[in-house]
Image (tube, rainbow, N blue to C red):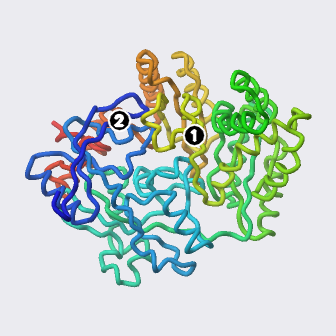
Amino acid sequence: MAKGEPGTTRRNSRNVTGWDRGDLECWQARTVDQVKACVDRARREGRALYPISTGLNWGYGSATPPRDGAVLLDLSGMNRILNAGQISEANPVAVIEPGVTQRQLHEFLSQFCPRLSFNVTGSSVDTSILGNALDRGVGYLGPRRDDVFGLEVVTGRGVLLKTGFRRLGEDSPLAHAHPYGLGPMLDGLFFQGNYGVVTSACLKLLPRPERSVAVSLALRDVSNLGAFLDGLALLKRLGVMGGVNHVGNRARTRASMMSGVSEYLGISCGVADADLAAEADRALATVAPYEWTSLGGVAGSAAQVRAAIAEVRRVLGGMAKLTVVDDAKLAAGFRLLNPLRNIWPWARANAAAISAIRPLQGLADGRPTDAAITNLLWRYGQPQAAGRELDESRCGLIFINPALPMDGAAVVDVVDGMKAVAAGFGHELYITLNIETTTSLVAVANLLFDRGDAAAVANAQACARGLWEYLRGRGLEVYRARADMMESVVDPQDPFWRTVWELKSVFDPDNLIAPGRYNLAQAPV
C-alpha cells in the first residue's frame, strides 16, 4: 500500500443475528481524501461500498451489507476529534469523525473538559457515536439524532458536501455553532440514508449539572402498566424528567444485572460455580421482584432535583416504589451492606445488586459502560472476553424495535401481542420501553439464542419475522431496521420509498453507496 492510499484487507461479516455474507473485501480509509479515492475506485470497478464506522451495530447486522457484492468501507481509522483544541464550556461542540468511540470522547472530556459530557448509550464503550446517531439510535438522555448537525459527506458522485453553515468553511464562527443553516436542511437525508459517506459531524456536548441522580420506579401492580406509562409521559411533557425513561420488563432487568450480581457472589462471597446461578436467582428475586421497572435521570441544581423528585412522587408514588440513587448513595450502601454479606442474606442480595447497578447508574452522568455486553458474554460462557468481541461469541441477538404512540393502553396491547408471538416460538422477549419524545416512545425488544445451535438460529430468525409481520398488521413499523430485513421494509410500490430512490439520482446516480440500505436496491418498475 502506497503512503496515503486506502488500505485493503478482508473482514468476516459473521455477527450475532446469525445472518451474514461471509468473508468480505474491506477497504480502509483514514482521511476524507481516501474516502473520495474509494468512491472513485468503486465507480471505476463497478463495485458497491458499504460504509461501517466500528462495525459494532449488534443485533442489526453489525458489518453485514443488506445486498451481496458490496465492499466494506471501514472508517474506524477516521477517529479524530477535529476541533479538540477549541472545545470548552463556552463552546460545547465536538466535531467528530465516524471512528470516534464513546470511550474515546469520554476519556478526552474527562481529561480536558471535565465539566462537559455527552448523551451516551447503554451499548459498548467501543461503539461509534456518529454511526449510532446516523442510524437514529437512542441515548440515555434522548434521541441521538438531535445531538448531531453540520455534516461533512462524500456523496456517491464523489463530491464533498457540507451541510448547514459548515458550508461557509470551518473557520466561519457559525460553522460549528448554528445547527440549521440557511435554506433546506439536507442533514436528514443522511440519517438512515444511503446517498453518501458521512466523514464528520458536529456533536452537541452537555454541561455537567450541579446534581444528577438516577430515579428508579418499580411498578407494584402490572395491571397498572398503561397508567404508569401515561404518568411517565406526563413527567416528560412537563420537563420534570426530560431525558429518556427506560422501562424494562423483568427479563430485561435480570439480564442487565445477572453478570454483576454473579461476579460479586463468586468473588466477594465465595459462592461455588455450581451454586452461582441459583444464588444469583435468589438475590435477584429479592432486589428485583417487579415485572416492570423504569430507570431515568433528574439533573439540575440541588433545589431543582428536590422539586423534580417531589413531583415524580406525586404523580407516580401511589403505583410505584421510588428509589433515588447517585454515586455517593451507592457507595454508602455498599460500605454498610458488604461487611454483612455472609451473615444476612438480604444484605448479600442488595450488596450484589449495588455492585451490578453501579456502572448502569453512571449512564445518567454520561459515563459509558460495557455492562450490557458483559452480561451477554457472561450468559454465553465468555465472561472474560472484551465487549467488542461479541460477534465472535456464541451469543445470538436479534432486535425487533417498533416505534409506538405515547398511549399507555395501546402500548400494553402491542407489547402483550408481541410477547404472545414470541411465546409461540418458545422465546421470551427482553423489552425496554424508551420514552423518547413527548409524543412517542420506542420499544427495544430482542431475542436471545445460542448461535452455535443451527436450529435455534433458524427459530429465532423465524420468530423475528413473525414479530415484524405482527407489527405491520397493527399499522406499526420498526424505528431501526436490521440488514436482513431491509428488502422487506422497503416497498417499491410506496410513493415514499420511490421518492427516496429518486433522490439517488441527485447524490449517487451509480448506486454505489450501500445499495438496498433504507432504500430500494434498484430502480422500481
Q: Nearer the viewer, residue 334 or 1?
A: 1
Residue drawn at 71 percent across, 46 percent down: 357
Q: In the shown orientation, is residue 503 left or right of residue 328?
A: left
User: Which residue has dot 2 on it?
Assistant: 489
Q: CA distance from mark 2 to mark 1?
A: 31 Å
- For the point 18% across and 48% down, the residue is 511
Query: Are the residues flagged by discs 2 and 1 in contact, CB closer than 8 Å?
Result: no
Q: Is residue 350 above or below residue 22?
A: below
- Residue at horizontal 21%, vertical 52%? 504
Residue at numbered disc 1 = 374
Q: Is residue 364 left or right of residue 179?
A: right
Most foreground residue, 72 or 237: 72
Which kind of residue does numbered mark 1 sit on? Thr
- Residue 292 to residue 465: above or below: below
Residue 436: x and y, percent? 57, 51
What is the x, y in percent for residue 27?
A: 23, 50
Q: Is label 2 or label 1 in front?
A: 1
Q: Position of residue 104 (x, y in %)?
A: 49, 61
Classify mark 1: helix, strand or loop.
Answer: helix
Please say if 45 is above or below 420: below
Tell me the quadrant of the picture where the N terminus can be found: bottom left
Badge 2 local density, few (<14 within 10 Å), some, or many (20+)?
some
Which quarter of the image is occupied by the C terminus? top left
Nearest to the observer: residue 68 or residue 156: 68
On the question of residue 375 being in view, the answer is yes
The residue that appears at 22% across and 35% down in the rendered structure is 68
Type of the residue with mark 2: Val
Earlier along the polypeptide chain: callout 2 or callout 1?
1
